[in-house]
Amino acid sequence: MPLPRYSHEFLNDFLPKLKKNGIIHYYRIAKSKEDIINELDQIIGKEKYKILNIRKTGSVTPTEDRYCFDIMILNIF
């Protein structure tokens, strides 16, 4: 997802199009990876996805970093 600052706004649009066990490479800008995990829990649902990998891919501001989450969607929406 090429818009890391606004990528959360598009999750609901393409989740129904994914196959079971589909993988999303989710880029997001946040203060911590825990903030992103909490956001994913609210948008997708805790039981419906599995985080395969988390990478910090750069700093955007002194207080915000860019992260890449590799997420497997377990249940079809």
Image (cartoon, rainbow, N blue to C red):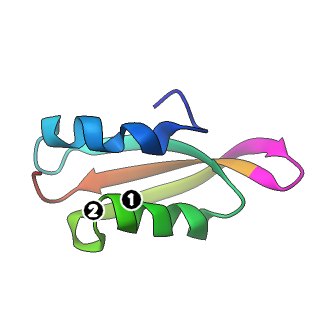
Residue extending furthest toward the top: 2
- Residue 16 lies, in percent from the top left, at 15, 41
Q: CA distance from mark 2 to mark 1?
A: 9 Å
Q: Is residue 47 above or below residue 59?
A: below
Does the magenta stretch mainly form a helix, a strand or a loop? Answer: strand
Q: Amino acid at mark 2?
A: Tyr
- Residue in the picture at 48% in, 51% down: 69
Which is in the foreground here, disc 2 or disc 1?
2
Q: Is residue 43 above or below residue 7?
A: below
- Residue 3 lies, in percent from the top left, at 55, 30
Q: Is residue 75 left or right of 33 when viewed as pictured?
A: left
Q: Amino acid at mark 1?
A: Leu
Task: Estimate how packed mark 2 is, as few (under 14), some (14 to 19) or many (20 or more) residues with alpha carbons within 10 Å.
Answer: some
Quarter containing the N terminus? top left
- Residue in the picture at 20% in, 44% down: 22
Q: State the residue position of label 2.
A: 49
For the residue labelled by badge 2, is the local secondary structure a helix, a strand or a loop?
strand
Is residue 61 one of those drawn in magenta? yes
Which residue range is magenta in the image?
57-64
Q: Name which quarter of the figure residue 66 lies in.
A: top right
Residue extending furthest toward the right: 62
Q: Is residue 11 left or right of 60 when viewed as pictured?
A: left
